[in-house]
Amino acid sequence: MTAESRAARAVWLAFAACAVVLGAYLRTSQLGGQILLDDEWHAIHKLLAADARDIATHFGLADYSIPLTLYYRFLYVHGGLGEWGMRLPMLLAGIALVAVGPWLMRRQAGAATIAVWSGLMAISPFMVYHSRTARPYALTTLLVFVAVVAFRAWWREGKRGWGALYVACAFLAGWLHLITLPFTLLPFLFCGIAALAQRDGRGVVRLVGLGLALAVPLAVALAPPLMNDWGALAGKTGTGAVTFASVYRSLLLCLGVADALPFAALAALLVAGAARWCRRDAAFVGYVATIVLGTAAAVAWSHPAWVQHPGTYARYLQPAVPFLLLFVAEGFAVCMARLAVSVQAPLAAAALAALVFAGPIPGYWYDPNQFMGHPYFQFDYDPAHNDYRTLLPTGPVPEFYRRLATQPPRSLTLIEAPWSLQTDHDPEELYQAVHRQYVKIGLVTPLCGVRDYGEYPPGDTGMRLANFVHLATLQPGAEGDLLVMHLAPWPATLPPPPQWPDLSVCLPELERRFGAPVYRDADVEAFALTPAGRAAVE
């Protein structure tokens, strides 16, 4: 290796290290303040009503990830369940993939490709989003990627360690979410066809042995919930339908862009990268294509619920995203190949920066924004195709929040109650974009009546959610500056309305405890909890 090539390699190594740091920043920024929304509550509802045995042997009507819920229950029993603990496995997996993926592929591609690929994964809006949620998709993406790479290494090299790694990752991914099984089982089809075509009897035997090694733990883990909840599981298939339009919009999500022009550029790089890779290792490209396209077809064929929405289809296919970005990175390396080494890394950094600003992240990366995972930002990156922007009202924002916007950002904490975990009934992300103050969710059980959907009893010591406050135990100045009571569900025109408590039961008690509201209109009543809260409104 020449001095020039060693220097270039060092530059790309530093580039990849910076990508890991950037990826960690994007995945951790404001993470502790993010409000748990929508499907993140499935596991909470389950663990509050079931023991470990029941969790392990059911999928549930509202599906939860069995091992993730068991982990949550462990935290719940031993010290308390908080937001950081719930999101930590996905956060670590999301960061790890930015580093582990390039390390596993370091001998399969050049330094420029590996470094740019690390950068693409670091800034991928879809991968960043799922690394920040209490759902298993970032974890399964890491596990599937490692399993797919390990399977091929085992097939080519015959080392038992690779086979053991594949079985461990494929098993855990399948236990976390059944939708990963096509990704991890299709390698058997690809290699099995190759073995039969070459009349490789020993290879067929090896595949059977590895398949049995995976089938046994999967059967032990999955047979009980499949038997107990087969009807519920079957009821979630055959109801959605993938269309050409939803495939295109799913690909936009996977590649992290909103419209056709950047998509076309990335698609062209992907094709160029796959073609170049094919010239040196056609088997790898065929292997990846079989897995990605086969899984896409299998998911579409099963017609899972809500798969017509691009976000649903895209998240089921998220384990394909690292492979897509790998070929994009290879295509970018092809374009840079004739440039001077000294300008390649700066050009790559500029291209990644342009890709960030062409994507959705700048639109929601303000502080504070405790609703970055809200479908208002994540359902579709193009506002014209985002149902949360086109079918739900985006205003008017109540005058109360515009008053708060005159105060310095991040100077106040609002406690908002009641609330709905269903984001189509949740306007707080719209309001926070205007008032720029911190938000906590007020739980009304039992002060305004008992609710079990998105709430839990105030005496439950296992629940340690920092962004949720029980009104029954709320004291002046203890948790926030203003208590904001929403008098009716939002929006008024969307059927069916969420469960909403009778506030006439509890507003008199709140007034007795905190004094007369400092603000009242048709939408909200606000109570001052601190002098700063009172001064902000009066």
Image (spheres, rainbow, N blue to C red):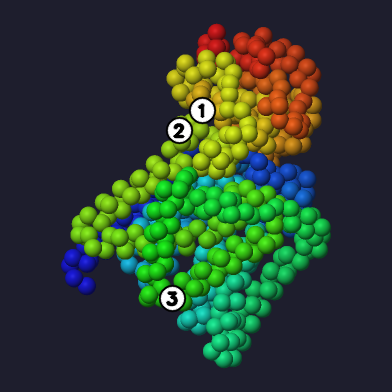
The residue under label 1 is which amino acid type? Ala
Hey, which quadrant is residue 116 in on the image? Answer: bottom left
- 516, 106: nearer the viewer: 106
Which residue does the numbered mark 1 point to in the structure image?
Answer: 433
Answer whether labels 2 and 1 touch (C-beta < 8 Å).
Answer: yes
Q: Please name whichever residue, 431 or 504, is drawn nearer the observer in this view of the structure.
A: 431
Q: Do the residues labelled 3 and 1 touch (CB within 8 Å)?
A: no
Local SS, label 2? loop
Quarter of image, res 268: bottom left
**Where is the N terminus found, in terms of image quarters?**
bottom left
For badge 2, the amino acid type reads Tyr
Amino acid beneath label 3:
Ala
Local crowd size for mark 2, using a 10 Å CA cut-off: few (<14), some (14–19), many (≥20)? few
6 shown above or below 465: below
**In front here: 50 or 145?**
145
Classify 10 Å Cα crowding around label 3: few (below 14), some (14-19), many (20 and above): few
x%, y% of residue 220? 73, 69
Dot 2 corresponds to which residue? 366
Q: Which comes before the other along the chain, label 3 or label 1?
A: 3
Sequence order check, earlier mark of 2 and 3? 3
Which residue is labeled 3 in the image?
Answer: 282
Q: Which residue lies furthest to the left in this view?
A: 3
Q: Is residue 449 left or right of residue 187?
A: right
Give me the C-alpha separation between circle 2 and circle 3. 44 Å
Q: In this view, does 26 lie above or below 498?
A: below
Give the CA distance from mark 2 to mark 1: 8 Å
Q: Where is residue 447 in the image (x, y as percent from the top left)?
A: 76, 24
Left or right: where 331 falls relative to 341: right
**Picture coordinates of residue 483 (x, y %)?**
63, 20
Looking at the image, tell me whether mark 2 or mark 1 is earlier in sequence order.
2
Q: Considering the image in quadrants, where does the C terminus appear? A: top right
Q: Can residue 229 be seen in this view?
A: no
